[in-house]
Image (cartoon, rainbow, N blue to C red):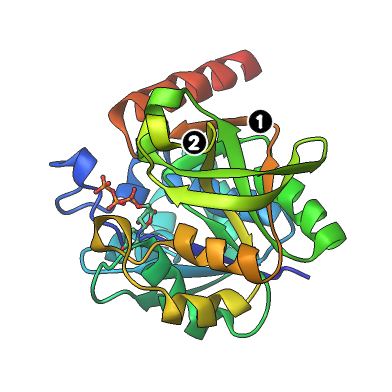
Amino acid sequence: MIKKCLFPAAGYGTRFLPATKATPKEMLPVLTKPLIQYGVEEAVQAGIPTMAIITGRGKRAIEDHFDISYELEHQIKGTSKEHLLDQIRSLIDTCTFSYTRQVEMKGLGHAILTGETLIGNEPFAVILADDLCDGNVLEQMKNLFNKYRCSIVAIEEIPQQDTNKYGVIAGKQIEEDVYMVHTMVEKPAPEEAPSNLAIIGRYILTPDIFDILRETKPGKGGEIQITDALMTQAQRGMVLAYKFKGKRFDCGSVDGFVEATNYFYNLEKEKQ
Ligand code: UTP
């Protein structure tokens, strides 16, 4: 059973400066909802009620968002705006949120290792909230985990010239959309990439990843890379890559963020 979802949210978000100078990237809104709320809703949709969030300096707004604001609720009670807090209030009522701080930003792998204290010795999900997905990707991965019981990364096909922005995998296809990983490289140059299958911000990890991360030396960019740790895990056992069904937007980039905003705006308009 996967009961916990880890949200590494300690990164600086430099691509979104100056917006991210004092506001966490994860709190940037697509329409009226911050990115991290979409992530939490995806975890809930997958039947995961416990959120473990890795924060850092300047990220307190995340904790405040997932807490009750009595003053605000009192202020809008009985007005036409009351329903605007319904969704977030229901998340606060049904989920548990715990936090730990990554004191030095030594990379995604290091952020995940920082989460060990919140996760313990059990398999868990990871959502990078700046990868905004539509299509219940985590639920699809959880179903796959129930069958194979090993770490799983979500992948999508990207243009070959973009491989230097992603972790890239190669592997043997074992069923439709599922690959057994044999190679994983962090941000390879297009001519060196083993494929155009890129890892996006959804993972299911087995807890042995923590011991592997402890041994993992800094890699690309001097950061401790989850890709390197997963490569070790694949060599020692098995890691799967899953080509998910749905749409994903790279909201860590301005282009992806604008695309997501338009997409969700059109979805909302269709509902009206
Ligand atoms: P990114 O590579 O998008 O880095 O991290 P970033 O710092 O957030 O953004 P840019 O590149 O400077 O614009 C991927 C994910 O890993 C988390 C980030 O918060 C993001 O969700 N992360 C990264 C950490 O939690 N800690 C780190 O040390 C690095």
Q: From this viewpoint, is residue 218 visible?
A: yes
Quarter of the figure with the N terminus: bottom right
Q: Position of residue 268 (x, y in %)?
A: 56, 22
Q: Residue at x 74, y 59 (%)?
A: 47
Helix, strand or loop under label 1 = loop
Residue type at mark 1 is Gly
Helix, strand or loop under label 2 = loop
Q: Is residue 216 above or below residue 23?
A: below
Q: Is residue 56 above or below residue 31?
A: below
Q: Position of residue 120 (x, y in %)?
A: 59, 85
Q: Residue at x 61, y 45 (%)?
A: 154
Q: Position of residue 97 (x, y in %)?
A: 52, 71
> Quick one: label 2, few (<14), some, or many (20+) residues within 10 Å?
few
Q: Is residue 112 left or right of residue 50?
A: left
- Please state which of residues 172 and 141 is positioned toward the viewer in this rendering: 172
Q: Residue at x 62, y 14 (%)?
A: 270
Q: Is residue 168 left or right of residue 149?
A: left
| Residue 177 location, quadrant | top right
Query: Is label 1 or label 2 in front?
Result: 1
Identify the residue under disc 2. Answer: 80
Q: Residue at x 45, y 68 (%)?
A: 53
Q: Which mark is residue 219?
A: none
Ligand 1 shows up in the quarter that is: bottom left
Residue type at mark 2 is Ser
Residue extending farthest to the front is: 192
CA separation in Å, label 1 and label 2: 34 Å
Identify the residue under disc 1. Answer: 246
Q: From this viewpoint, is residue 251 visible?
A: no
